[in-house]
Image: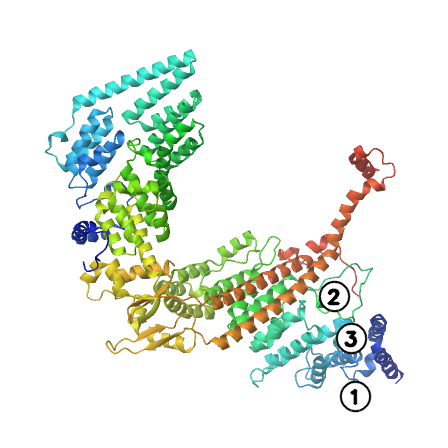
Amino acid sequence: MDTTLPDASGPSRADMDTAALGDTAAITTPRARVPVKVEDDADMVNVAEPPKFDLDTYIANYTGRTRYDRLYLIGTCSPLLSTDALKAAITEAKTSKDVSRYERAVRALADVAPNDPDASLDAAWVQETSRYVQTQTERLEHELRGYKNNLIKESIRMGHEDLGNHHYETGDMAAASKAYSRMRDYCTTPNHITSMLFKMVNVATERGDWMSVQSNVHRLRNSQSKPEDAAKNLSKISAASALSQMHQGSYLEAANSFLSVPLDLGDTYNEVISPNDVAVYGGLCALASMNRDELQKNVLDSQTFRNFLELEPHIRRAIAFFCNFKFRQCLDILEAYRPDYLLDIHLQRHIPQLYKRIRTKSIEQYMIPFSRVTLDSMAKIFAPTVVGGEARPTDISSPFVQELVGLIQDGVLNARIDLEKGLLVSNQIDLRAEVQRTTLESLREFNEEAHLRILHSAVLQAGLEVKPENGEGPGLGKGGRFPRAPGKD
Amino acid sequence: MTLLSDIISASAHLHSSNHLPSDEYDRRIRELVEYFRRLQTTKALESFANDESFLDRFDPAIDSIPFLFVLRVQIQKVQEQNADLFPADIRPSGKLWTRAAHFLASFDGVQVRYAGREWRLLVELVGQASQAASTASRLVSNISWPLLGATLVKDAMLRLDPSGAVFTSSHLLLVRLCLQAKAYSCALPVLNKQICHFPISLGRPSSEPSVLCADHGSSVSFMTEASEVSSKISYRDYLQYFLYGGMVYMALKEWRKALHFLGIVISMPTTSSVSLIMVEAYKKWVLVGLLEKGKLCPPPSITTPHVVKVYQSLARPYIILAHTFERGDLKKLNAEIDAAMGVWSADKNLGLVAQVVAVFFSQTVIKLGKTFAALTMADLSKQVSPSPVCAEVTGPAVSSLIMSRALNATLVQTKDHAESSMLRFSSIHSLPRLSHELDLQSQLKQEMKLMETLVINLGETNNNLGLSDEYVDSLHKGQVWSGSSEVNPTGGETGLEMDEDLMGDMS
């Protein structure tokens, strides 16, 4: 890597080298993978490279049902970790009451490691648990009916809540969300309402129903709880809303929301998102949607978000590199962590899009100070493998040049490619000529439009509209209704 | 010979009143025209029908009315004698033709306003005679008779109405003659004037606000329905005029103006059905839109939606062609054109379609100029069309584009791989500064002038609409509503005004 510069952030050196080592392997596969529609089905994603995290410490960050989801995702997407992750997922499922999850994990493990002792279904447990779930459901519904007969609001609310919790634990999300939403009429204090809304947010998050997350977050913001409670909930609320914004693809809003997550989030929201996640998601969304000044001001200099960034120093380094005009290093770091992020339950779907935006934006930002750049120097920064691999890296058919062509045609880059001298020349806009051109154009358009409309009204006034053949002749149409002046002298 | 001296004295009477106030002049000229119309009906003018020297006594620039009437009588006489609509005397280079030409080139615009009918008949005759001459002598001579007629008609029209803002039947005659003569630029002086009005009956018959001979700001006040400067106009006439006008501009490759004219045709108000002329115009509109803007232009915003739907169903092949053009695949474009060859030739649009292909190439190359500053010809032909056949064709095509200044670029021979030269696009704004600025300035001035005339015409339209029967009617109705309570003498309590109204209407 000849582009690594001796720079201030020394400790990153070692990291950089490992990143560079993994680079050759990493860069070829993702490129092939980009056209795959990830959102079609998540199972298609296959992350061959080893991620940097340790499975046990990673999963220890989370609590609740998300643990299983994350383990299952890693198990199905990463061949290297699949056995470990799936086994952990099976134990996770067995401690809960969710039979379908257990069955799903076992099936997945059987595909990967058929000879593993865990790969066969524990029929006794399944039967026992399903019976338990069944009776429990009936019992809770029965109780609820009793409460309803007694007409005590608080009991009814709790009855619904218990039923909802039960459905949530056993994986029946539709029923859980129905039960929770029924609580609404029986809530008497703001605290009840917030707790109900949080439960609904959790259910919606697990279902991937981001519109519903958004609307519940909105309700949470408007709920009239006590100031100290509101402050306590604020971190969770903003984290949830940021997450839903990211999933809806509005990265700039998501970045701003993540940046505004208060520091006291801590481990309070581990059933959905950890502080590390906030740092990563926020950092990536910001990188993909903000320019260098905004990044410096809103992300690096932010008092609260800096603390989140401490948890994931490589994200901070990537942003710093981006702000300091060192795009190669920034992209290298991101490439190195690509497998990690592809194994993240929330990021997986968005990584191709986010990475593409970051890359486009770095090319765009790179071009800003120059009036002309050699394609070679650009290729060294943005497509190092192409430089090494091909005889003529700046030929028209090389993927890097094609990428530039695409960017120019989409209007992202205001520049032109000079293939003779191997340059990218930025377009100088002659403001005077531009103004003259637009003036003339708008004048012409106005005149044409005005003429059309004047003629239109003249035709109507003269009663000369286009009318059916047989109706033609004097005295019909508009002129007929109002007899005109007689005079033909 | 008393009649002759009568006529001479009558027109001399008019000469002396030249400096009179306009209403007096108006009265006298009306009298004169009445006098001639009377003579005409009593066949008193017949006596001059064969007297060739008679017309020599009058100068058409001063005595336009006597000249015009006598010329009409003479022409009628000749037509009757020969039992032929266009005998040799009337045909170009005939005796009466020269007289008519002399008149049309020098008549007094103000006097002729009073004899609009006779003037129109003469113009029509000249036009038709030149047409007839061309059909008769096409094989014998190669002189373009319609051109002679067209020039006369054009001059006469501009003489009568220099602003050219009112549509008359002569407009249609003129463009038709020009298209026949293939003398497209001959029609331009008239086409470039913007038509904003149609001859209508003005105002209330009882109150004539001003006299015909007065110095009018806009021609709409003397080119009225009553003056019969134009024959009865139907919607077909003006649709045809604008379609033909568009075709004249197409022939001159002034695509933008052609597009405007076609836009007028396709956006005209309809009651329920669509004229085939409009459909025809839409087909040309699609093709011209491709030539001018390189894309399928939506019809003007004031077009009614159901008309647009009719176009889209009737001009299917054209719209498909436009979509293929936009998608930018030369091979498919050619395939589309070949597939619908019958349609193009049936609609007589083959020429335009052929130009579309030529423009497709130059559009693609110019678009490449926005992406690349320089690239080899080999790369270029790869970008334009993937098939290898085109490689030899692109070279000459590009150089002809550069030579015709459609493309601002240079070709450079490179040393290292000589088989392919380098095409270097000039930077976007490197036009020769001064001439460009001057050109722009004149264009801006021209547009401004146009806008000024439009504003005048707009005021005129506004005024006319304000005087129209419909508007006065509705105004009157409004007054009846608000005024009836005062009119009713038995009006009592103010709180029951509504009731009072109803009662008043019933009684």
**Whether residue A127 can be seen here:** yes
Q: Is residue A150 above or below residue A55?
A: above
Chain letter for mark 1: B
User: Which residue has dot 2 on it?
Assistant: B221
Count of numbered circles on the image: 3
Amino acid tagged 3 = Gln
Is tag 3's residue or tag 2's residue first in the polypeptide sequence? 3
User: Which residue has dot 1 on it?
Assistant: B53
SS type, badge 1:
helix
10 Å crowding of disc 1: few (<14), some (14-19), many (20+): few
Q: Is residue B357 left or right of residue A65?
A: right
Is tag 3's residue or tag 1's residue first in the polypeptide sequence? 1
Q: Where residue B421 appears, x then y in whole percent?
A: 29, 76
Q: Where residue A329 appears, x then y in whole percent?
A: 24, 54
Chain letter for mark 2: B
Q: Is residue B63 left or right of residue A84?
A: right
Among the 4 quarters of the image, the one containing residue B501: top right
Q: How far apart are the two marked residues, 3 and 2, measured between alpha carbons?
A: 15 Å
Is the Cβ of the residue at disc 2 closer than 8 Å to that at disc 1? no
As drawn, which residue projects farthest toward the top?
A150
Q: How far apart are the two marked residues, 3 and 1, measured between alpha carbons?
A: 23 Å
